Amino acid sequence: MRALTVRPLQAGSLAVSDDLSEPVPGEGELLVDGIALGVCGTDREIAAGEYGWAPPGRDRLVLGHESLGRVREAPPGSGFAPGDLVVGVVRRPDPEPCGACARGEFDMCRNGRYTERGIKERDGYGSEVWTVESDYAVRLDPGLADVGMLMEPTTVVAKAWEQVERIGARSWFEPRRALVTGAGPIGLLAALLGVRRGLEVHVLDQVADGPKPELVAGLGAVYHTDPMDQVTAKLDPDVVIEATGAGPLVFAAMAGTGAYGIVCLTGVSPRGRTLSVDAGTVNRDLVLENDAVVGSVNANLRHYHQAAEALAGADPDWLRKLITRRVPLERAAEAFEKHGDDIKVVIDLTDR
């Protein structure tokens, strides 16, 4: 069986290994034929040797957490059947669950002992065949067979919007206008979910041409390339979903919402860059306007089901346009090379 593997913390170790044994499903597990794998910034960081943990006792990790597969075998009573289109959940609770993990909120783990498929101590979904516990598999609409690998990034923004709504519920909350910063996969999917909520959605990105403006327009949203402070001054957004991790945009978002505004940070900023910030003004604005800033990462089963519903209700042609390159598993290394117009790059696991 072929699989995309890497030696964590060792740059240049990315390889398509062909010597792995096909997995045997354990009790309560599905046996799944892999269809495709989405590639994101986390995967690129692991491939670059910056991040990642191999399973205990191993030196290689099967990469991949943006999964898509079709069930080959399912145990009786699992709720799944051969032929079902599925994705696998990424995170698992820690072995001695913290309070959050014990209640199914493993995306909010308090002690960091969680594991993650394709990232932290568990093999990922980047193989021709994989297994997954039926409790950590989610069925997709059959019509999503060519775009279902978008499920995992959609779960990230489903959680982000849930966090915004829960914070907003501390008082009267009827947002009208949302700004999404960044028109990568997370930003565009955040815009999709904002439009589905009936909001007036605006997307800010530095790219003036290519597929991004068209994709935003296809949602009925508005695309901007002006400086952040000009955009926020004009829009006075109720909600900002920050999807770039760029330090200047993060702080501009905090300063740019309307009163009682909410900023949700989903992008991870690189370390080592120093910014000069008027912390006093930031604090003053947050306090006097009852603003809120929240970080959000990962997702739990609830968010997977929310994402599955959102994708099933989305325009499939619009979703297909998010995938700007498809690469066969044999040439998987090409998926880790950045191209100027890339949005989502996908590895085809069925290229034989």
Image: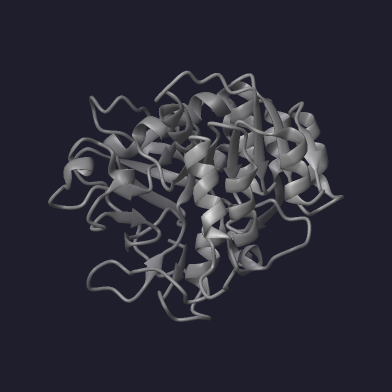
The single residue placed furthest to the left in the displayed view is: 96
Front position in the image: 322 or 239: 239
Vertical comparison of 81 with 11: above or below: above
Please indicate, yes or no, whether residue 252 appears anywhere in the rendered image: yes
Q: Residue at x 55, y 19 (%)?
A: 174
- The chosen color scheme is one colour
Vertical comparison of 200 with 45: above or below: above
Vertical comparison of 50 with 313: above or below: below
Front position in the image: 12 or 156: 156
Q: Residue at x 52, y 56 (%)?
A: 280
Residue 218: x %, y % from top left: 78, 30
Residue 155: x %, y % from top left: 47, 38
Where is the N terminus found, in terms of image quarters? bottom left
Describe residue 15's horizontal placement relative to residue 31 as left or right.
right
Q: Residue at x 78, y 52 (%)?
A: 227
Describe residue 193's horizontal placement relative to residue 287 as left or right.
right
Where is the C terminus found, in terms of image quarters? bottom right
Q: Residue at x 49, y 79 (%)?
A: 13
Residue 180: x %, y % from top left: 65, 40
Front position in the image: 1 or 130: 130
Please indicate, yes or no, whether residue 351 appears anywhere in the rendered image: no
Rendered image quadrant of residue 73: top left
Front position in the image: 51 or 64: 51
Describe residue 210's horizontal placement relative to residue 302 as left or right.
right
